Amino acid sequence: MRMMTMKRIASVLLVGFSLSACSTIDDLMESEQVDYKSTVRGDPLTLPPDLSSAQINPQYSTHDGAASAAAYNQALAKSQKQRANGGVLPTDGEMQVLREGDKRWLQVNRDPNVVYRDVIAFWGNEGFTINRDNPAAGIVETDWAENRAKIPGGLLRRALGSIIDMVADSGERERFTTRLERVNGKTEVFISHERMVETSMDRDGTSFKWLPAEEQQELNAIMLSRLMAFMGAPKEKAREAVKATNSTASQKAYKADFVGNNVALGMNANQESAYRQVGQALSSAGFTIDSSDASKGDYIVRYLDTDTGEKRKSSNIISRLFGDKGNKIAVPYTINVTGEGAQSVISVRNAQGAVDQSETARRILSVLREKL
C-alpha cells in the first residue's frame, strides 16, 4: 500500500476526534492551532524541500540556494542572548502592526540587520527550515512545511502518539516569505505565504496532485503576532496588536487593472502604498525578488515564461538529475511603480529601462493583478 494511501486512511480514522475548525484570527490565536513541522529531513538548512520550487512554481526561480546551518545557529544564538539580556524592544512604541486593506505588516524601530537576524531565528524556532535568504534584498524564504495542528487527533492521537504522526497527513503545505524594507529610519516586516493542497484527481480518490490554494491573510497575521512575541513583546500584547487591526475594513483597499491597451496596471493608490502592495503581491505569488529600490520604485525579479510556445530542448537523464532545465532559464525583470498624486502605474521595464510591451510582461502583470 502506498504511503500516501496509508496517510489518507489514518486521517479518516481521526476525523471523529477532530479539533474544532477556526475561521477567524481571534479563534486561531486563542486555540493556537499553528504547529509547523518542516517537510525537510536531515540537515534542515542544506537539503532541498520535498516540494521543490520546480515542482510548484516552475516560472518563479529561486537561485540563491539554502542558508547555511552555521548562519542559522549564529542568528539564533545572538537573538537568544539579546533577549536574555533584556535588550530587545524594551518599550511598547518600538513595534506596531499596520494595515492596508486585508494586508498587515510590522513596523519595528530597529536596524534592519538586527531584525533580519531575528527573522531567521524566528522561523527556525517555529519549526521551519530556511530554503533561501538574501540579506541584500531583505528576503527570507522557508521550506515547505506542514501545520501539524490541522491533523485531527484528540484522544486517539494522544493514545497512539508518534505512530499517528508518522502516517497521518494534513494534505496541506505552506511556505513563508518574509521581506524587510527600510522606511524612514524604521524596518517594515512583511510576511506572506504560498499554499499547496493535495487534491483528488479522480472520483475514487486514488490519484492525488498538489495544487496551489488561496493565501490566508489570517495566517500571515498570526505569524506577525508570533514574530512580535519572539522579538520581545509580551505575548498577549502581540496578539492584541494584531486583533486591533480587525476594526479596519477587511475589503481590499486598492484595485489594479490594465490601462487601456497598454501593458501596464493602473492603481488607485499613491506611490508609497502601491510600491508596498506590489512587494507583498510579488512575495505572495512566489516571485524571487533579487533586489529592490524604493527610491526608484523598482523590484528586480526573476521569471521563467513557460507560455511562449517555444519548444523546450530535451536534456538527457544525467543532466536532469542535476537540475538541468534544458533551454529554459529564469531571466531578470524590473517591476516599476511610478506615482502621481493618488494614482500609480505598475509596469515591467526591459534592460534599457523602457516599458516592456511584450506578452511576457503582460503575463507577469496579470499574475500581479490577481494578487493586488
Image: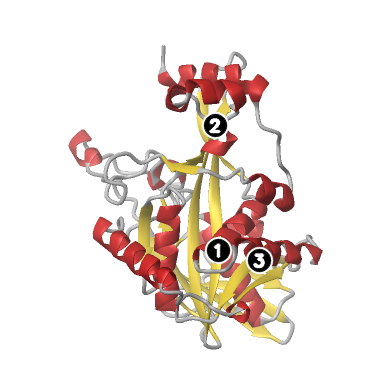
Q: Quadrant of the N terminus?
A: top left
Residue 155, image quadrant? top right
Label 2: element kind: loop
Regarding residue 211, the answer to whether it shows in the image is no
Percent of width and height locating residue 241 = 68, 67
Q: CA distance from mark 1 to mark 3?
A: 8 Å
The answer to which of 73 and 39 lies nearer the viewer is: 73
Label 1: element kind: helix
Labels 3, 2: front one: 3
Q: Quadrant of the C terminus?
A: bottom right
Under mark 3, the amino acid is Lys
Determine whether, in the image, residue 79 is placed left or right of residue 184: left
Residue 102, image quadrant? bottom right
Q: Which residue is mark 3?
A: 237
Q: Which label's residue is closer to the chain start, 3 or 2?
A: 2
Percent of width and height locating residue 37 = 45, 41
Q: Which label's residue is closer to the chain start, 1 or 3?
A: 1
